[in-house]
Image (spheres, helix red, strand yellow):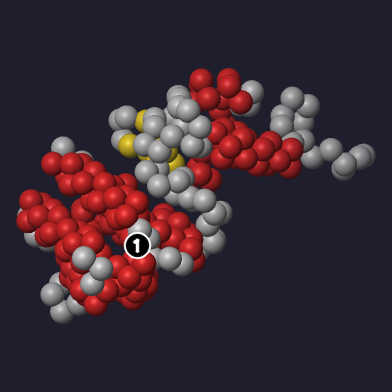
Amino acid sequence: MSKSASTHPGHPDPASERLLGDKVYEDLLQLLGTPGFESRARLPGETALSQRLGVSRPVLRQALARLRDEGRIYARKGSGTYVTDALPQEKPISLSTLKNIGDIRAFLEFRLFMEGEAAARAARTRTEDEMHHIRRCRERFDQALADGSDAVEEDVAFHDAVAQACGNRFFSMTMTALAPQTRFSIGLSRSLAGRPQGERREGVYHEHAAVEQAIERQDADAARLAMELHLRGGISRLFGREA
């Protein structure tokens, strides 16, 4: 009795399905940034997108999940799937997910040192165009808060804009790699922090503004301190004032 066939007629071969999923992922990557798929654009529904790419919806979902994990797209509950505000230009480094409270705290402490230095470098090297991008991302964040959104994507975009302005592409590449963990930690802070929501949002609003203003006046020490205070604020909002 032959043991060679492990799949049934009419059922997709798992290896072939993975290859097809890889192709759909690459096709979607090529679409991001093109008309209709720009930053902040809402993606077509699964049915329309699967028909456009000529694949089944399960295969499409695999590719979309991969793009979400990489921080290239994100889902907005009850609204659909959107392209991130800042499209990554590099494939992200593979990093494990945050598994426990200790991981979350260690991750925030790592961001504190890395992003503090990025802010200081941005203050020294930023161009007028980069400064404009930082300002626009901060304004979008403020507007999202005013509209009642959790503003997670706008928050990530602001931090990415600072990293992009620091004159060293590896900071921005690292931010891209950290995007899924950053989204998770921001969302957790929003949901678990003990202070009233309005007070928390007011605090983050002023912290972002302090970072932007220090970078604009090209004060590296103040930019580093403002970013560190912002991220320490995130730690204290989750873990208490001893942070």
- Which quadrant would the C terminus be assigned to in this image? bottom left
**Left or right: 116, with 5 as reference point:** left
Residue at coordinates 61% horizontally, 35% vertically from top-left? Answer: 27
The spot of residue 109 in percent (x, y) is 32, 74
Tag 1: residue type?
Arg
**Farthest front residue in view:** 128
Asked whether the viewer can see residue 228, the reply is: no
The spot of residue 119 in percent (x, y) is 31, 68
Quarter of the figure with residue 207: bottom left
Q: Is residue 97 above or below residue 222?
A: above
- Which quadrant would the N terminus be assigned to in this image? top right
User: Which residue position holds label 1?
Assistant: 126
Residue at coordinates 48% horizontally, 50% vertically from top-left? Answer: 88
Quarter of the figure with residue 43: top left
Residue at coordinates 15% horizontally, 55% vertically from top-left? Answer: 205
**Farthest right residue in view:** 1
